[in-house]
Image (cartoon, grey):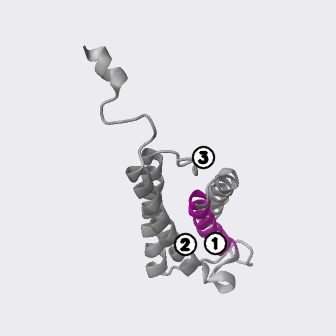
Amino acid sequence: MSGFSILTNRKRAVVALAHSIVFLLIAVRQMVAANPAAGIWVTSTVTPGTWILCGILLVVSSILLWLLIISRGWMEKSYFAVCTISATSGLLRTAAGDQAFHAALYIRVIMLASAVLVGLVIVRMHSRFPLEGSSSTSSEYAEESS
């Protein structure tokens, strides 16, 4: 799989897909619950949980941006791009509040749904094309058991 530098095997692709599914479920729950985010830039009391969530989303967005930058193939880049957009929109919604950026709820869900679809394609690609030289019973292991 020459088009991948991070999601180089099926196991990594499945882990990434699982993360996308979990975060999609969380984003859908947030969208349905519709607890308005006050934001940290408004003149109101900001709870410690909001500050913690901003910090977590900042770290996650930064890591995903870095993964987007170092990824190689267009499929991998598109996966990390939609994940980065999702996390960054969550960060902006939490920081600015729903009054300024309410659309972030919907952007997150759409981007994570896209990440799940791209992740499924990547897993399928890894399932269809095993690495060169590998098979279900490798000849080097067959020789050791003799």
User: What amino acid type is highlighted by mark number 2?
Assistant: Met
Relative to 80, residue 32 above or below: below
User: Which is more foreground, mark 3 or mark 1?
Assistant: 3
Q: Indicate the position of residue 12 as horizontal and vertical percent values.
A: 47, 47
Label 1, label 2: how far apart the Cα atoms are: 10 Å
Residue 93 as seen in the image, left or right of residue 10: right
User: Which labelled disc corresponds to residue 5?
Assistant: 3
Whether tag 1 and tag 2 are in contact, CB under 8 A, the answer is yes
Residue behind mark 1: 89
Label 3, label 2: how far apart the Cα atoms are: 22 Å
Report helix, strand or loop for mark 1: helix
Q: Residue at x 34, y 25 (%)?
A: 139
User: Which is more foreground, mark 3 or mark 2?
Assistant: 3
Magenta region includes residue 140 = no
Q: Can you see residue 22? A: no
Whether tag 3 and tag 1 are in contact, CB under 8 A, the answer is no
Relative to 88, residue 140 above or below: above
